[in-house]
Amino acid sequence: MGVLFDRVCLIGLGLIGSSMARAMKRGGLAGHIVGAARSADTREKSLELGFVDSVSDNMAEAVEGADLIVICTPLGAYKAVAKAIAPALKKGAIITDVGSCKSQVIADINAHRPDGVHLIAGHPIAGTENSGPEAGFAELFDGRYVILTPEAKADKGALKKVEALWKAIGSQVEVMSPEHHDRVLAITSHLPHLIAYTIVGTASDLENQLHRENADADDLVKTNEVIRYSGSGFRDFTRIAGSDPTMWRDVFLTNREATLEMLGRFQEDLVALQRAIRWGEGEKLHDWFTRTREIRRSVVNQPSRSPDADLTE
Amino acid sequence: MGVLFDRVCLIGLGLIGSSMARAMKRGGLAGHIVGAARSADTREKSLELGFVDSVSDNMAEAVEGADLIVICTPLGAYKAVAKAIAPALKKGAIITDVGSCKSQVIADINAHRPDGVHLIAGHPIAGTENSGPEAGFAELFDGRYVILTPEAKADKGALKKVEALWKAIGSQVEVMSPEHHDRVLAITSHLPHLIAYTIVGTASDLENQLHRENADADDLVKTNEVIRYSGSGFRDFTRIAGSDPTMWRDVFLTNREATLEMLGRFQEDLVALQRAIRWGEGEKLHDWFTRTREIRRSVVNQPSRSPDADLTE
């Protein structure tokens, strides 16, 4: 494939950042990779693991001379990152990122982006439950979708270069507007996570109630029972609800509007089914449950890697 | 182990019924197994597969002389089954079942149960996505929990016999009150299923809206996108929402009270998180998401068979 960018700067060296670095090394896609991270431990490990050529604790220094800057921090740090690196960015440099929300992210970066520096925001649909530089691996993005969300006025040449990078890494690239991305991910990812977090918390409170009130043990659900019988459906939710709290706090705060809209639709539907249960409307329930089977079939027929690789983002 | 029941009658020969028959054959636990099923095809297949010794399309005939009767039909059929078999039951016979709800089931059977016939209701926490007599296998209950819910006044000898049967099949037996069972399963199984059915329907409606209104394509989520990006969380829900519609309609109608109670708790929690998102209360979200990780860790540490065997019931 050959070198696509002479100098790449990764800001944040966690699961995604370190996997990107490894994938770029594997393909020989970058001349030099510099990694910026706040934690000395992370910087040391990253050098040791060899997926970066140099490291820095200073973002502004790290982006100097870089042709491509990839922001791989939690969404809540974007504003500070954009502000810190702005004065040091090279003319013609391209900024991209890997965050789960796009509209707000673009606004955050644009607030500080100098003229002549391009922004092509992106989101690889890949991840695992693990985090940190040791958790990354070069194959994480193989065959996975990466969504790019350039603004209408974005530089076409910059878009082509970021697209070429992800294709060289082995991913399938889709281009859509930031607003559309945020709606799609709100229903396929953000709402499912919110719901899973909620029900796992609801179950956990049932246990705490038992401890607090010293109530009739037979009347209340014990947590060892929740766990013991979790194979009956609950287990799938706990897996999602084990995702990183900081990342997900930032996702909900950043993609607030789309998440609240999808949540509103979900709640209307849930109340309709609740009412059908209360009034014993079996046919309504049966119709709804039959309809949802179709989507299941489409998902099963959709080619994908092992479900275990599909956990987060 | 040796024969525990001279004559066993299974009413319903689907996944669970046929698996029980196979497991009893494997252990030599029953002298003669007769299977009752409405469909000629099911009866023929069951004889052919050899997990029953005889079949009948007449439940009353089938239970004649049986020491143990196992009801393995959908919950909605219990009342009719109890009524049909009542006159033919042998004195001292034991009725048990495999249904996902217990309080209502016990009331349905007791309404017709003759004096001198015992009832020990049960619920094996095991299943797969598949159904029908071909889908069953002898190992389905190996190492799995089976909950027995005898009434306080139930015959101790009958309880011991049903307990011994499940242990001989290879399961771990837990005994609790029907009401307690229904609350535990409402949170670990019935509510998760209801939520999964809801969100998959919500997503499906987003697509239909697109078709109906011929609206601005960029503004709406397309179903191929829901499926394409389902790895981001949604996929886990579609798996649950692919479960049998008739079985689950009956579960919600039968375990109405406990399901509605757990649903109410869940909705309160969901609204609290919704409010935290709207008002940007990051700390509240972070606290909640951190708490749910603990339950995830306990679930992961819980010994169990492959997650794929944990899909239903």
Image (cartoon, coloured by chain):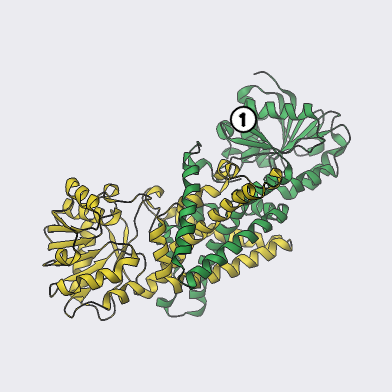
Chain colours: A yellow, B green
Q: Which residue is mark 1?
A: B22
> Would you say residue A10 is visible in this rendering?
yes
Q: Position of residue A64 (x, y in %)?
A: 12, 67
For the image, the number of numbered tags is: 1
Q: Secondary structure at mark 1?
A: helix
Q: Quadrant of residue B73?
A: top right
Q: Nearer the viewer, residue A82 or A212?
A: A212
Q: Quadrant of residue A102?
A: bottom left
Q: Nearer the viewer, residue B217 or A96?
A: A96
Q: Position of residue A32 (x, y in %)?
A: 11, 58
> Which residue is rendered at x = 64% and y = 64% of the image?
A273
Q: Nearer the viewer, residue A152 or B289?
A: B289
- Decide: is A11 above or below B165: below
- Decide: is A78 above or below A30: below
Q: Quadrant of residue A28?
A: bottom left
Q: Position of residue A65 (x, y in %)?
A: 10, 67
> Which residue is rendered at x = 33% and y = 51% of the image?
A131
Location of the N terminus of chain B (image quadrant): top right
Q: Nearer the viewer, residue B47 or B301?
A: B301
The crowding category of the residue bearing disc 1, from other C-alpha atoms within 10 Å (few below 14, some 14 to 19, many at least 20), is many
Q: Position of residue B296 (x, y in %)?
A: 48, 47
> Would you say residue B224 is visible in this rendering?
no
- Decide: is A130 above or below B152: below
